Amino acid sequence: MTRRIATLATLMLFVVLAAGTASAQDASTLPLRSEAVDATGYPEVSMVVSVPLEMVGKNLTSDNFIVTEGGEVRPSTATSVPTDGLQVVLLLDASGSMGGEPIVAARQAAQDFIDTMPAGVEVAVVSFAEEPIVLSPFTTDQEETSSAIANIQLGKNTALYDGLIAGAGVFDGQGGTRRTLVLLSDGGDTASVASLDEAIVSLLDAELAFYAVELQSPEYDAEALARLGAATDGLVVAAEDPDGLTAVFVDVASQIVNRYEVSYVSEAYGRTVVAVNAEVDGISASTSQGVLFPDPPTTTNASANDSSSGDIAEVEPTSVALRSGSIVVVNWAQSSWALWVGALVVFAALVALLLFTGLGQPKERRAKLVDSKSSFGHSKGKTLASLADSATLLAERTVNRGEAGTGRVTVLLEKAGIQLRPGEFVVLSISVAIVVMAIAVVFASPWVVLLSGVGTLLVIRLWVGRRVTKRQEAFSDQLINVLLMMAGSIRTGFGLMQAMDTVATEIPAPAGEEFQRVKIEIQLGRDVDEALLAMAARVESEDFKWIVEAIEIHREVGGDLAEILDSVMETVRDRIRVRRRIHALSAEGRVSALILGLLPFAMAFFMYLINPEYMAELTTTTIGRFLIVGGILLIGIGLLWMRRITTLKF
């Protein structure tokens, strides 16, 4: 890699990582774990949240919590939830796969979990291998619990589902008001008599809070644990190696113990998003969930004779939480690792584009790169450039499977003046789409990411089409000068080939490039008429077709070619004059189409800024969504119609 491309790559890395860092800072808010909103006493509403480990011991008060309901801040109070009545079952995997370092780390993590529990919390320990074993019933004696953890005996198989049922059964007959089960497992079930569904039913019947720590190993079953977490509305946390178990267990313990009840008076009706934010000493944590509050009260007439009096219909003071069971605390696209992965993907894609196009490289290296591409890039070096060449070869073969497809792409690139093979154009387009999707994945949902990729490819296609139009218009503007130069050259005694060579040398692109290509094709043996007709097809100029026909007739019957070109030039000049006049007269129609097309979207944007609730009727109701889709379709039809009547073909 040369010094110049290394500098450019370093600058790109700095920009991308800086953007990733800024995004990470925006998304650095820690998660609050929340339980379902309790609105049985509506309008009084309460939510119990567990603060992250970073906020433990900060003595949070009501001033540290902010409740937002439907985007509006509500006055709230926050009180610490005591640990009275808290019972915890530690369910530990003792199968053969836990042997060695995992079981040592698991014992230490479980011990740290016990040490984090306040005095008076009842803890039971259950292990499972071929079958579950209750090592210690509920007790507040931490020494007894620690001894049970130290005496865990390893087995061979993994009876995970039987262990869950046994762990839930420990709560039977106990008087605890807060039941919590914490599971550690590194493998899928191999020996249970019960099924996964039976285990889920057992956990739901026990009415407990479920936490699962999955120690990732070749045998662990992420799908089963995900179903357990989703069905119980629990939390599933992954630990990549045994060294991370202690931190995960301490974090889970802090969430179980450090809970706060946040209460406020609601002013919302119907479906509403309730968000709680906690902030102390520069540390911020938040959570939000959708809640279904009662509908607004309705007024009915008390009698047919008295329309001024009415009774307020009674409303049931109930609510339904709309949250779905989360497997992780935050969305994957909002986690810090996703931000950095996205930044690295963007950087890698940009570097690949740079190497592929040869930008920032010396002319000698760029020439070699072009030569390698012309031979389909059979480079043997394991570099990004060779990968780009291989991708181009694969795209070339894919496009060439359909001759009609590759012909359309080739013609389109020729008309646009883009000096790329179809395979190269496909690879570049896909690379740009990947870059856009990698950026979008940091900020948006998967659907938006997919739409951004498709939209990028559509924009590229529109850009190529616009380039074709601009090139054709530029050629039409140069046509008079081309005819003047050809006629002048022929009058001085030059032949047709010499006249075209003069045009190729003196006239700038695109006319100069096109005549240069015609000259090369003729030198390689192509007939003059065929080369000129192919050029006329590329530039799609009706005027130039007349010129080609005039040259073809002259070659057959003879005559003064300069005089013929002068006659054609006068006709072409008149046509250009009429075309420009029509273009000026139709400008009002084109501007009207542009304004009418953008006006609805601009009005919708400003109305959303002024009154979001008013616009929400369009986005939150079925009929509103149909109206949006119908409006967009009608706008599109209107724009196509106005374009049709303002575009003249003659």
Image: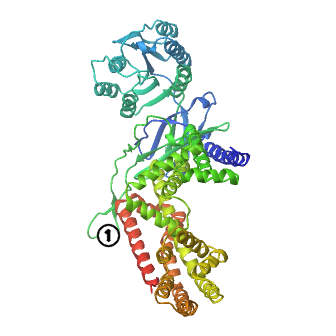
Residue 117 seen in render? no
Q: Which of 286 and 247 is in front in this view?
A: 247
Which quadrant of the view contains residue 222?
top left
Query: Could you tell me which quadrant the C terminus lies in?
Result: bottom left
Q: Mark 1 points at which residue?
A: 307
Q: Which of 5 and 591 is in front in this view?
A: 5
Q: Which residue is drawn at 50% across and 50% down?
A: 392
Q: In this view, does 224 lie above or below 343?
A: above
Give the colour scheme shown: rainbow
Query: Could you tell me which quadrant the N terminus lies in?
Result: top right
Callout 1: few (<14), some (14-19), or many (20+) C-alpha neighbours within 10 Å?
few
Q: Which residue is drawn at 38% across and 65% down?
A: 629
Residue 406 percent coordinates (x, y) = 42, 60
Q: Residue at x 26, y 69 (%)?
A: 304
Residue 346 seen in render? yes
Q: In this view, does 600 lie above or below 397?
A: below
Residue 458 percent coordinates (x, y) = 47, 61
Residue 583 percent coordinates (x, y) = 53, 86
Total numbered badges shown on the rendered structure: 1
Q: Which of 496 and 211 is in front in this view?
A: 496
Residue 159 percent coordinates (x, y) = 34, 17
Residue 595 located left or right of residue 134: right
Q: Nearer the viewer, residue 600 or 62?
A: 600
Secondary structure at numbered mark 1 = loop
Q: In this view, does 607 lie above or below 226?
A: below
Amino acid at pointer 1: Ser
Q: Is residue 192 above or below residue 413?
A: above
Which quadrant of the view contains residue 408?
bottom left
